[in-house]
Amino acid sequence: MLALLVPLQASAMDSLSQLTWKNRIALVFGAAGEARLERQLAEFTRSDAALADRDMVVVRVTEETAEAVYGSIGNLDAAELRRQADIAPGEFQVVLIGKDGGAKLKSGEFVDSETLFGLIDRMPMRRAEQD
């Protein structure tokens, strides 16, 4: 099930504030080594040009670690990210955080790149970037 514009907290992910107004962030949560976690990450990272064009950072969040698999980000606390997004350890979820720091998507299902990029491309800030 795909949920859009999900209110996670006032600022969706306070620990990601270093990227506010600079990057869009795709957080992919799941159990370490889980096939669908790796499949989702592979889907999102197969087009560097599309990610770069949309100022994306893609982050793998497992039970113990949070690390950028595309783009650059400082130290992140996996437990804090899960707490802020209300996601249990090992639970598979995809969360998109917009440049404004708000959650734009939360899904427990696989999200193809076309869907992700289409959602981003419909956002007012993205449309302004393209003008």
Image (cartoon, rainbow, N blue to C red):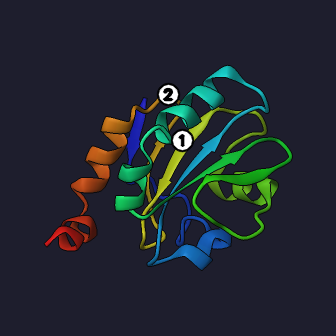
Residue 6 falls left or right of residue 76: left
- Point out the image quarter for the N terminus: top left
Spatial CA span between label 1 and label 2: 8 Å
Mark 1, other Cα within 10 Å: few <14 / some 14–19 / many ≥20: many
Image quadrant occupied by the C terminus: bottom left
Q: Say left or right for 117 vs 14.
A: left
What residue is shown at x 32% (from left), y 47% (from top)?
117
Type of residue at label 2?
Glu
Q: Which residue is mark 1?
A: 94
**Sooner in the amino-acid sequence: mark 1 or mark 2:** 1
Q: Is the C-beta separation of discs 1 and 2 under 8 Å?
A: yes
Residue lying furthest left in this view?
A: 131
**Residue 59 at x, y = what percent?**
63, 51
Give the answer, above or below, for where 130 lies relative to 65.
below
Q: Determine the residue positioned at 71% across, 51% down.
A: 82
- Residue 109 - label: 2
At a point 48% along the width and 40% down the height, the residue shown is 44
Please, what is the three-letter code of the amino acid marked with disc 1? Val
Q: Quadrant of residue 30?
A: top right
Query: Which SS class for mark 2?
Result: loop
**Relative image position of residue 11 (x, y in whole percent):** 54, 72
Q: Is residue 129 above or below residue 107?
A: below
Q: Quadrant of residue 40?
A: top right
Left or right: where 3 falls relative to 42: left
Mark 2 nearby-residue class (10 Å; few <14, some 14–19, many ≥20)? few
| Residue most extreme to the front | 49
- Identify the residue shown where x is 46% and y is 76%: 22
